[in-house]
Image (spheres, coloured by chain):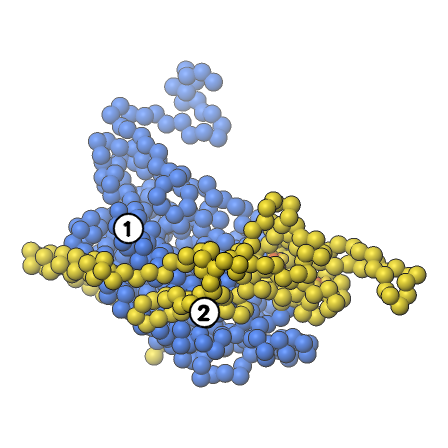
Chain colours: A blue, B yellow
Amino acid sequence: MTSGGLEAGGQIPGFIVKKIEKEVYEIFIGPQHPGSGHMRIIVRLDGDIIVEADPDIGYVHRTMEKLSEVREWLKPIPLLERMTIIDACNVTLPYVNALEKLMDKKPSTRASYLRVLLCEINRVASHLYGMGIFGVFIGHSTMYMWAFGDREVFLELAEALTGARLTHTYPIPGGVRRDMPQELPGMARRAVRYMRRRLEEYRKIFVDNPVIVKRLSGVGVISKSRAVELGIVGPNLRASGVKYDVRIAEPYEVYGELDFEIPVFEEGDALARTWVRVEEIKQSLNIIEQAVNWLETHKGEPVIAKEDFDKLPKLHKEVYEREGRVKFVPAHATMKIPAGKAVARGEMGRGEIFYYVESDGGITPYRVRVVTPSARNAIVFKHVVPGHTLMDLPAIYGSIDYFPPESDR
Amino acid sequence: MPPKISLKKLDRRGGLFEGVKSNIHTLALGVKYLVDPQRSTLLYPKEYIEHRPGYRGFIIFIKDKCISCAACARICPSAAMKMVRVTEIDPKHPDKPRQKQYPVINYQRCIFCGFCVDVCPTEALYHVPFHDIVYENLADMFLSLEMFQVEPQRPATSEGLPVVYEVDEIKGLVKRRKS
Ligand code: SF4
Ligand code: SF4
């Protein structure tokens, strides 16, 4: 194609042709950059003011939805958790909930509590991960080290509960795969007390640190109406004063029975977004405590639906008694799910996750659609970043806790 | 009490005094951890973690228990487990060789989800609580039926000492030598 064609408004299929104005400097940030995951932001600068920012997503697209269609019903669980491996239970739970709706199955209460327990352990670990990366972005490497070190405490809890640090593959339709080990309540209580004290130290070294406060206040402000208009979710939405959390708007599992308080801030800037996460960790710690207290005092119920448990062969029951491990029956490998459509949603560390699952009665899903929180938060780059200086970009990126593998699926 | 959602206020008092106070807090805390750091680094391979029972590590196969049902190969989400056909000779009937199927595993693909262990109707598969094993080449990661039945040797055990990590109220994760 000749340049004459371009000037006349010609187009190259698959390419976006843009005229660059004089004095505007275009830089490509990423796909490899100090943050987490791969994602490119194309920014156009006038001096050091960003006049335009284009999030260029898709570097870690792994066709999760399509792959789910060619795998038997249970197999997408370990697959989908790899979208957000740091938040594995939260990301797969709505999928399992959708299957349960299709199968008309209800998990036992004990299983629900165990799911909530792991979800909240994941949420703390995920927020710590986000704060650590945020620290790297704005050059505060102490925060990075601390957050990643403290995250290990919660991974240790998750490992004791499920047998794997990150890829738990814990919820299954009708329940969970393992019961809580004996020592977990003690471990969890110690971890909770430790983390409460540490959050106070985080406040001193990071969120109340005058350098950080100056760096973050008034940066990347998203007003309440703007946040709703852009459709952002999760802690970012709550930092802009919108009272919305799926755990409260549409309680799933046993969230309706627990006592916790979702923090909302009004300022909508990077500092408020950081504070939302700190306060949310505190609430998650409360929930962890309540969950282990309940689990300790309500023993006896199996961790999968009663009707499923009664049908298990003798050896399976023995293994459950001995190790607390739920064994599958071979029919699970090729189980069929009644035809129908189901939707389910849940609140991940980064916001609302939504699943649409359709079955045609076969052994694999007909369609699995997933909308992840990061996919919805990516729009912030396009609409909030312009007008800031280039050095505010890392602060905004870190504060919205964007996780590319989750967004790209 | 049901969960609720509530508005919180950010404390944004500026002022010289507040600034100086938070600066001092920050520095004091930094100094505290400078003299008394919190360390939990594992000095691998001089030390190795002894995981709890129930840790999903390498998978070992017990041939005598297997009934060749292939459930493990069918449920594997990453197609890491495959069935192989072998001819077996029963000592009682040496003239009648039998065709049997047994699973083998490919550790290039395995994601340690544990579905195969959980689905086996006779407990012919089990996890060992570690997965730090080195293979010299990729082809070795595709285990033969014989290799699949032996518990692998953990390389760190020859020169390292076992440690366990415990959750501590003051220090977070603490490493403790296991006697
Ligand atoms: S642990 Fe999972 S991935 Fe590995 S062989 Fe078993 S079923 Fe397959
Ligand atoms: S599931 Fe167990 S019994 Fe069946 S083939 Fe696999 S190892 Fe053998």
The residue labelled by disc 2 is B178
Residue A141, disc? 1
Q: Secondary structure at mark 1?
A: helix
Q: Residues within 10 Å of mark 2 (few under 14, many from 20)?
A: few
Residue B162 in the image, given as x and y percentages of width and height: 47, 64
Q: Residues within 10 Å of mark 1 (few under 14, many from 20)?
A: some
Ligand 1 occupies quarter: bottom right
- The chain letter for the residue carrying disc 2 is B
Say if B162 sits above or below B86 in the image. Answer: below
* Cα separation between marks 1 and 2: 32 Å
Residue A205, disc? none
Residue B21 in the image, given as x and y percentages of width and height: 11, 60
Nearer the observer, A41 or A201? A201
Residue A330 in the image, given as x and y percentages of width and height: 69, 66
Q: Secondary structure at mark 2?
A: loop
**Discs 1, 2 touching: Cβ within 8 Å:** no
Q: Does any portion of residue A241 appear in the rendered image? A: no
User: In what quadrant of the picture does the N terminus of chain B appear?
Assistant: bottom left
Residue A259 in the image, given as x and y percentages of width and height: 35, 76
Depth-wise, is mark 1 or mark 2 nearer the camera? 2
- The chain letter for the residue carrying disc 1 is A
Q: Amino acid at mark 2?
A: Lys
Nearer the observer, A202 or B143? B143
Residue extending farthest right: B95
Q: Residue at x 41, y 16 (%)?
A: A3
Q: Residue at x 40, y 68 (%)?
A: B176
The image quarter in which residue A22 lies: top left
Q: Does any portion of residue B88 appear in the rendered image? A: yes
